Amino acid sequence: MNDRQQSYARLGWYVTAGVGAAVIILFWWGISGHLTTLTAGPMNLAIGNITGLLGTYGILWQLVLLSRLDVLEQVFGMERLTWLHRWNGYAALIALVAHAIFLTVGYAIVDRVNPVAQFLNFQTGWADVFKATVALAMLVIIVFISIAIVRRRLKYETWYYVHLTTYLAILLGFSHQLSVGTDFVGHRAFQVYWLTLYAAAFGLMGFYRFVVPVYLMYRHRFVVDRLVRETPDTVSIYIKGRTIDEFHYEAGQFLIWRFLAPGLWWQAHPFSISVAPGNDHLRLTVKGLGDFTRAVQSVRPGTIVSIDGPHGDFTLNRAPHSDLLMIAGGVGITPMRAIIETVAAGTRNVELIYAVRTRADIAMRAELEKLVSRAGGTVHYLLSNEQVEGYAHGLLDAAMVH
């Protein structure tokens, strides 16, 4: 897909999202939106309805953005998808909080009670509203822990499993929408439309996040073959499988790996594939930086592996015509090692700057030097924590690149 095709494809997705929102607004206007022209009570209620509908629509798009749909990654790229997921999540949450506030104020005006009393009445006297309140609280917590300054303080597993409660929050909210949604109850066409949206969002997520990995595990029977220590804290894990030549990926991409071993089976983590396509094995290279990455370095040969992917657009397609200067730090060398292997089999040249703390931290050294040499280049090592003759010392700067 060239740049123009990618731009048109992105536009198509934006238009799809916009049309979906426009349909919701049209239904809303015909059912309750016209009440915005009346007094304060009905106006607040109508605004509360549309913010709830659009907020829920945004949450369903969160599921689609998280579904790992291949075409979305190809069109937007992982970086842009992550950006869309973050800001769409913020917008959806703001809309849902506004929904709760406007409806509370609106009904308080209509019933001539204070907002606190109206809120308590919602929790005790309205079907499924308490569930919706719990769902909104869950979404607030999920968005809060996604803020970078908070997430950095959490273990990946904590962040991941709290995120899984998004699905429960959506289902709790849907029961509320089904039973008391003013624009939903009694309007068959609108109900069918929303049921279609829910089915599409959960269907895409379920298919790509659960069905596809199970199918790949059944088809290829991936298992751990052997482990090779690359540095004192880094290990390469070789994966064998059936018809592995039919598992297609591009150098530079990553998989989400799940090792079906005691203490590990419930965790899935993303790691780059550190060998190029065309080998008789897959490989990930893991540095022991946390509980999981240290534990996985002791996984036993024969352990069954479930994979999800491939994902990512850090591939040679992003630099199709020129020779390459590649810059890597520490274990970040892994996707580049696969790309260099691909380049070495072709006609392009490559130069590699590899920054590490000490010589002991250089991973896959023999492989890298052999492949880069085959590609007509040189590996330039940069050590930050020790000075050794023949090695550059310090931190990477523009002078070294030039």
Image: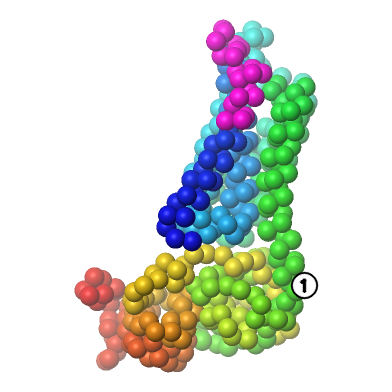
Residue 281: image x %, image y %? 63, 84
Left or right: residue 2 compared with residue 222: left
Give the colouring mode of the picture. rainbow
Residue 139: image x %, image y %? 61, 41
Q: Which portion, as a residue range, is magenta?
A: 22-42
Residue 97 part of the magenta segment = no
Question: Dividing the image into 4 quarters, which one contains the C terminus?
Answer: bottom left
Name the residue tied to disc 1: 218
Displayed quadrant of residue 354: bottom left
Q: Provide the secondary structure element on which disc 1 rests.
A: helix
Above or below residue 281? Residue 186 is: above
Residue 137: image x %, image y %? 63, 37
Left or right: residue 60 compared with residue 18: right
Residue 68: image x %, image y %? 61, 57
Q: Residue at x 52, y 45 (%)?
A: 12
Q: Residue at x 34, y 74 (%)?
A: 322
Q: Is residue 143 visible?
A: yes
Above or below residue 328? Residue 96 is: above
Q: Principal SS element in the magenta part?
A: helix
Neighbour class for label 1 at 10 Å: few (<14), some, many (≥20)? few
Displayed quadrant of residue 333: bottom left
